Amino acid sequence: MSRLPTENGTEKDVKNIAEKEKPKKKKLFAKKKEKEEKKIPENETPEEREKREKEEAERAEEKKKKEEAKKKAKPKDMKQATKRLFSYLKDFKGLIILVCVFVVLTTVIGFVASLAMMPVINTIAETVVAENPDISAAFAYISKWLVLMAIGFLLSSSLNLIYTRIMLYVSSKTLANMRRDLFNHIQTLPLSFFDGRKTGEIMSRFTNDISRVSDLVSNTLPTLITSSISAVLTVGFMIIASWKLTLTITVAVVLMFMTVIVITKKCSPLFKEQQKAIGEVNGYIEEYIRGIKNVKLFCHEERTKEGFSVLNENYRKIGVRANIIGGFMGPLMSMITRVNYAIVVILGAKIVMGGGMDIGTLTTYLDKSKSYGTPIAQIASCYSTLVSAMAGAERVFEILDTPSETDEGRVTLVRLIKNALGEEEEAENEGSFAWKVPTEDGSRYVPLRGDIKVNDVTFSYVEGTEVLKNVSVNAESGTKVAFVGSTGAGKTTITNLINRFYEIDKGAIIYDGIDIKDIKKADLRKSMAMVLQDTRLFAGTIADNIRYGKLDATDEEVIAAARIANAHSFIEKLPDGYETDIRSDGNNISMGQAQLINIARAAIAKAPVLILDEATSSVDTRTERLIEVGMDSIMEERTVFVIAHRLSTVRNSEKIIVLEKGEIIEEGNHQSLIDLGGKYYQLYTGTFEMK
């Protein structure tokens, strides 16, 4: 057949054009379909389009957050989490084996005892239909079986009580060990770990997550074993009693398992999401209770309530969805069981009338067929609890798996005294401090002077955003160095790096001629005392809080430190003096008094390096002057770093460092910087406001 010519060319040309048009048509169709799905009006104004796009973006963002939340809540490795959880039970292996034996005995004895109803019912039936029944003999026979049944149930209950108490003991000990490990590990984590987490979220690991693990160990595991054995025994009895009748109810068993699989599959992500939601609620509550004064100060009560309502409502919705779907389990299983029971009654009655089964066996069979769904439902419930507990356990293990603060230092801090030969040797709590530096031949001692050099240091909290840029500071022993500058200039960061709270990116910090990377962190921090702007006190007496700087300090040393910080006068006026109890938040004393106690804590440590980070910002001018006078005595022959916005407090510093955007822009003493007429002059004279 010849190809027919067309107006625009051959048939082949037409086909080629059609092929090229297909993607365009497909794209237009997709756009049209998308428009229809989004219900975009034909004559949409720019304002309406902007509003619609904004709403779509918000919905997309909300959907993305939900998907991320679900992904985070999902256990990464259920098998590994289970293995690690059960590793905590290895110390109780003997008790757990005993519990398993008791659980098996409890279940088997209880099941066998229930079978005693068969001869009882058969005897009653035979006595009723007999022409001349021997009532006394029948009653005696029935009584014997009832006594055996009672003994069996009593023994089963007693064993149940014993293994329950054992499991409660194992559970409490296991969870105590988990809490101990979690708390101890948190002490080893770097500050960067806490920077990106709310306190309430961490607290949730100690409360909600471990509580779910407790339920798993104390209740779920024994129930899982009991239900599994009960299910096997029940099905086994039913097959032996009438395998034909049992075959007829296999459909019900299949339906039950399908119900379990479907519902647990739906429930698991929701319960994991619920765990995360309660963590967010706890974090919000903890954060705003701690900041309740600021909330009231700025009249943000309504806004705070709205924020809580959003989180609380989210938790409620997730909980409702999880429990509604999980709640389907009971009614569905009950419906299947009752329909199945009716079928068994009809078919069983037919078998009995045909002589294939006695009435006692049928009655027991009916009882078991009615209740055999219970252990299956319990197993399903145990699975949901298991998944929820594993999600909680994994959140705990997530923290336990967080790498501890690394410390490769080998140099330690020791005390030296001279012996009778004039040689220096290490002592316990006397003598002068020195650095013990390992060498190839043993070790050498470097006197602790407090000479600190910051050499060309660059640092960033977040990669790519430098907080300090090539900063160099030389703080000789016994000098007072002050850092001034705008908020965010990097003042506090320098002192954080000296303490090795964070590791520097480039450069080095030299302490008495030793790179601080070579000094063990605990010994490095032991050589320094630090007073922060945040007045953090602990629950206990005032004496205990001052003694926190030196745990073995005597009462005389505590009082002496309080006198130095000018805290002694107000402490004496308190009803219980130094034994006055302080709440953990310190709300029963003023903020200024709390800071004086903090300063006394630093004074009692008698460390060669003292860091004051806005230490006097919480006290009035008069108290500040008193503190400065008192601090002068402990600053003698010590290196002092001062960070202050009040420039009056840094005037007597030998060296003042002016920072701006992570760089040193001016350096010198007070008079030289005033004569320079630069940024410090502007700050001091008030021509430039420090923000």
Image (cartoon, rainbow, N blue to C red):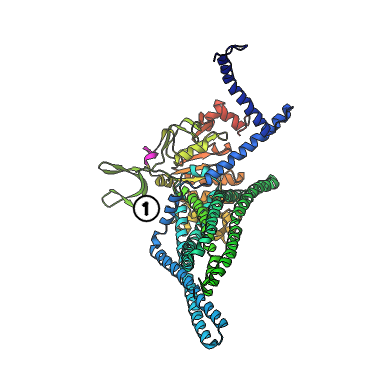
Residue 46 on the magenta span: no
Nearer the observer, 688 or 627: 688
Quarter residue 44 falls in: top right
Q: Residue at x 48, y 40 (%)?
A: 496
* Residue 191 locus on image (x, y percent): 48, 43
Where residue 133 appears, as percent x and y from the top left, is 54, 86
Foreground pick, 540 / 435: 540
Range of the magenta residues? Answer: 511-518
Quadrant showing the C terminus: top right
Query: Splitting the image into 4 quarters, where does residue 506 fall?
Result: top left
Q: Is residue 174 left or right of residue 320?
A: left
Classify 24 as above or below 551.
above
Q: Is residue 211 visible?
A: no
Q: Residues within 10 Å of mark 1 (few under 14, many from 20)?
A: few
Residue position for label 1: 430
Q: Amino acid at mark 1?
A: Glu
Check disc 1 and report its element: helix, strand or loop.
loop
In the picture as drawn, the residue positioned furthest to the front comes out as 1
Which quarter of the rendered picture does the N terminus lie within?
Answer: top right
Q: Is residue 429 above or below residue 459?
A: below
Q: For this rendering, which residue is in front, 329 or 72?
A: 329
Q: Residue 648 in the image: x percent, y percent?
A: 58, 38
Residue 666's spot in the image, x, y percent? 52, 28
